[in-house]
Amino acid sequence: MRDLITSIDSTRLGFFKSILDEAELACFIRNETTSQLTNIFIGPLQPTLCLVNDADYERASELLRPHQSTEASFAEEWLCPACKESNPASFEVCWKCQTAKNE
């Protein structure tokens, strides 16, 4: 087993998993439902897309590369100006109230 991508954006991980599933690369999302929990010794348990077979790492990375934005992966979450909900950096509108992101 090998970790491929860790992200707080579970939608993004689900999208990446669907790409790998279509390519018949065995994978799963670890900590998918525990992202809000924190362990005092290891920190937050963030969702991570994992490959079952280490040998698939290069192929999986190649398949996902066109779908990854370096700008979005380094950007931080933003708070909606209307409802104050936290949103992933890649979202242009709030997932909860559809208010546009302030630039």
Image: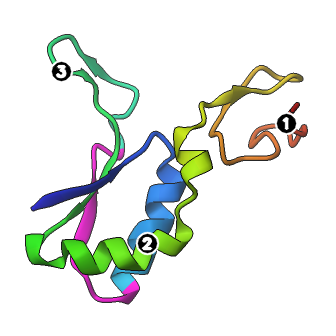
Q: Residue at x 35, y 81 (%)?
A: 21
Residue 95 in magenta?
no
**Residue 84 vertical position relative to residue 92 in the rendered view, above or below:** above
Residue 22, located in which quarter of the rendered image? bottom left
Dot 2 falls on a residue whose secondary structure is helix
Q: Which mark is residue 101?
A: 1
**Residue 1 vertical position relative to residue 18 in the rendered view, above or below:** above
Query: Which of pointers 2 and 1 indicates the residue nearer the eye?
Result: 2
**Residue 102 x/y as whole percent:** 88, 31
How many neighbours does mark 3 have within 10 angstroms: few (below 14), some (14-19), or many (20 or more)? few
Dot 1 falls on a residue whose secondary structure is loop
How many neighbours does mark 2 have within 10 angstroms: few (below 14), some (14-19), or many (20 or more)? some
Gap in Å between the C-alphas at discs 2 and 1? 26 Å
Residue 56 vs residue 60: left or right? left
Q: How is the image coloured?
A: rainbow
Gap in Å between the C-alphas at discs 2 and 3? 28 Å
**Residue 48 x/y as whole percent:** 30, 49
Residue 16 vs residue 52: left or right? right
* CB within 8 Å, label 3 to label 1: no
Q: Residue at x 48, y 49 (%)?
A: 10
> Tag 1 or tag 2, which sits nearer the N-term?
2
**Residue 58 x/y as whole percent:** 24, 75
Dot 3 falls on a residue whose secondary structure is loop
What's under tag 3, amino acid-wise?
Answer: Ile
> Tag 3 or tag 2, which sits nearer the N-term?
3
What's under tag 2, amino acid-wise?
Answer: Leu
Q: Which mark is residue 42?
A: 3
Q: Which mark is residue 64?
A: 2
